[in-house]
Amino acid sequence: MTEQERKLNIQIRPARPGDAEFLAWLILTAGRAHVKRGIWEVILGGTEQDNLEFLKQLTVTATPHLFHYACYLIAEADGRPAAGLGGYDPRICGYEALYRAMPEVLRKLGHSGPDPEANKRAERALCCMPEDTEGAWIIDSVATLPEYRRKGLVDRLLVAILEKGRQKGFQRAQISIYIGNLPAQRAYEKHGFKIVDEKRHPHFEAEIGSPGMARMLKTI
């Protein structure tokens, strides 16, 4: 632990239901990364507050899934959530589980059913999402509050989430980035991740502002 980390009094802990508001910010911010508009903003449309409320409800559904609080670790700095990330088994908490949880969110928000326009936007925004590597522990939604960036929080979180994957029996880990997000790429390469393939599409670039997404893998 560095002197800077000791001064901040960093603690890594599992996320709780009471972290829903912070997790909503985390997921939205991670989706933005360095691009002009994040995937969630493209899919959901509406205002930032609308998006945050949707994601807040999404993190506390009865059905666990990749954006559920139970999949997240949080780094607290001086007693407040400052950074976080998710890690999950795609066979249990992957996109099928997310789709099962979605009706609960829509009911809570007073929607009668899926928005056909949102489904169309989702097709354009998700066309470059990398496939889940068979047998890999998936890491997702990495973000830090601006005032706590470059202070070692993500490094600590990555070590913890990789250890969690190892304890669950995984031998590989996967993380995805927007093509061109060099700071994220370098941060993950420092932990042993390497780009194995990319997906590109003009629709994705038009909507998001990045040519596509890259899949990174490492042995754990």
Image: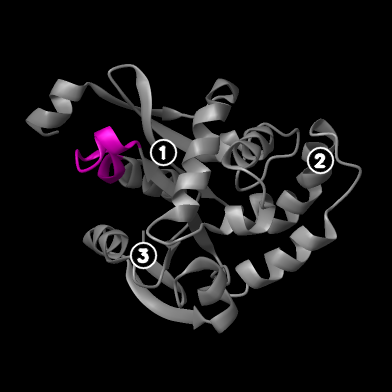
175 vs 144, nearest the viewer: 144
Quadrant position of the N terminus in the picture: top left
Residue 66 image point, x, y percent: 61, 48
Local crowd at mark 1 within 10 Å, few (<14), some, or many (≥20)? many
Residue 115 image point, x, y percent: 83, 54
- Is label 1 in a helix, a strand or a loop? strand
23 vs 86, nearest the viewer: 23
Is residue 151 on the magenta stretch?
yes
Disc 1 target residue: 84
Outermost residue to the top: 79
Q: Is residue 201 visible?
A: no
Outermost residue to the left: 3
Local crowd at mark 3 within 10 Å, few (<14), some, or many (≥20)? some
Task: Report whether 177 appears left or right of 131.
Answer: left
Question: Which color scheme does this rendered protein use?
Answer: one colour
Disc 2 target residue: 106
Q: Can residue 40 be seen in this view?
A: yes
Labels 3 and 2: the sequence-earlier one: 2
Residue drawn where x is 65% and y is 34% of the image: 53
Q: What residue type is labelled 3?
A: Thr
Give the image quarter of residue 181: bottom left
| Contact (Cβ within 8 Å) of mark 2 with mark 1 | no
- Real-space Cα separation, disc 3 to disc 1, in angstroms: 22 Å
Q: What stretch is highlighted in magenta?
A: 145-156
Give the image quarter of residue 95: bottom right
Disc 3 target residue: 219
Residue drawn where x is 42% and y is 50% of the image: 166
Residue drawn where x is 25% and y is 40% of the image: 149
Q: What residue type is labelled 1?
A: Gly
Give the image quarter of residue 178: bottom left
- Real-space Cα separation, disc 3 to disc 2, in angstroms: 38 Å
Q: What residue type is labelled 2?
A: Leu
